[in-house]
Amino acid sequence: MRFLKNKKEDTTNFWISYADLMAGLLFVFILLIGAIVTKSIILKNNLLSSENIANRTKTALQLKSDEIQELKALLFQKNTQLSSFSNKIVVLQSIINDANASLLEKDKSLKDYKGKVLVLSNELNEKKDAVKLKDEELLKLLNTLGAKETRYDRLVAQMQKTKEKIKNLTGIRIKVISELKRILGEKIKIDPKNGSLRFSSSILFDVGKSTLKEGAKKELKKVFTEYVGALMSNADIKDHIDKITIEGHTDSDGTFLYNLGLSQRRAYEVMNYLLTLDTVKTNHIRALMSASGRSYLDPIYGKDGKEDKEASRRIEIKFSLKNQSAMKEIERILDEK
């Protein structure tokens, strides 16, 4: 009984397995059919696309064929034109050949001229170089002449200005000296050239000494007071006064340094005394006064051309003008010319 039961179960399991197998096969068959249908549809679409491409290609080939026919017709036309041009070229070539032959003949005749032209060209170049050198030399000369003319014009203008300055400066000094002579009259003698006062050293000092003599102070005071009064009381003179200098001078006996020291001491002695006078304070000339020793640098000569030693030993009181330095500068410029 148990055996029959087992057999029945086995038979049942077999049919179940068989049914499952058949179901699987059916599913596979359905998948194959679907795949075949899908591929068929794709192949059909591809075929249609290929046909479309083929039709377009055929149409394009037809158009190209038409164009080729047109190009053939155009090429035939061009060949016809080229044939015509070829005939013309032959004619032109003939003309060119004739022209070349003529040119060859002319070229032979021109060769003779080339040599002559070359010689003439060399000669012309040489002359051009010579003319160029002459032009350069002439230009240099013109530049030099122009520079000299410009410098000459400047010198002329400068000389003209210098003359005017000298004239003005000389006129001022002459005017001052003339006013001094008019004011002082015959009482006090002044140098007619520079308007200075001059005192003999033998009157003011003992031999070899630099101490002012007491007896000379009164005369020195009187003369200096009138001289300063004449200079400072007249506005035409006062405005031009720059300095009042006391200079000491010696003769040429002895050494230069000894005489320089002696002349300086004497000049300072006279200035120190003059600074004590009321006329210096009244006329405010203290700042204008200075003293200087000259040793024997400015000797005085007699008519025989020899040194007048007595006259050379002296004290001079002189004035200088405000533009006297300008006068010296002008004289220096004139010396340079």
Image (spheres, rainbow, N blue to C red):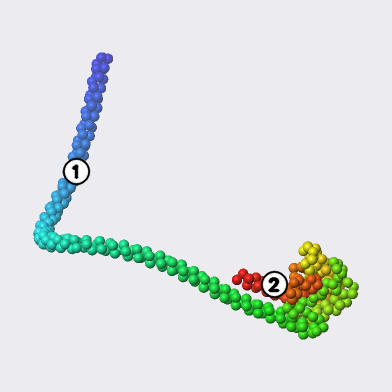
Residue, disc 1: 46
Nearer-N-terminus badge (1/2): 1
Q: Residue at x 83, y 68 (%)?
A: 266
Report x, y in % for residue 160.
60, 77
Residue 43, placed above or below residue 69: above
Front residue of 83/209: it is 209
Within 10 Å of disc 1 (Cα), the crowding (few <14, some 14-19, many 20+) is few
Residue, disc 2: 325
- Where the N terminus falls, by quadrant? top left
Q: Residue at x 82, y 66 (%)?
A: 262
Q: Quadrant of residue 93?
A: bottom left
* Tag shown at residue 172: none
Residue type, mark 1 in image:
Asn
Report x, y in % for residue 261.
80, 64
Please tell me whether mark 1 or mark 2 is closer to you in this view: 2
Front residue of 75/89: it is 89
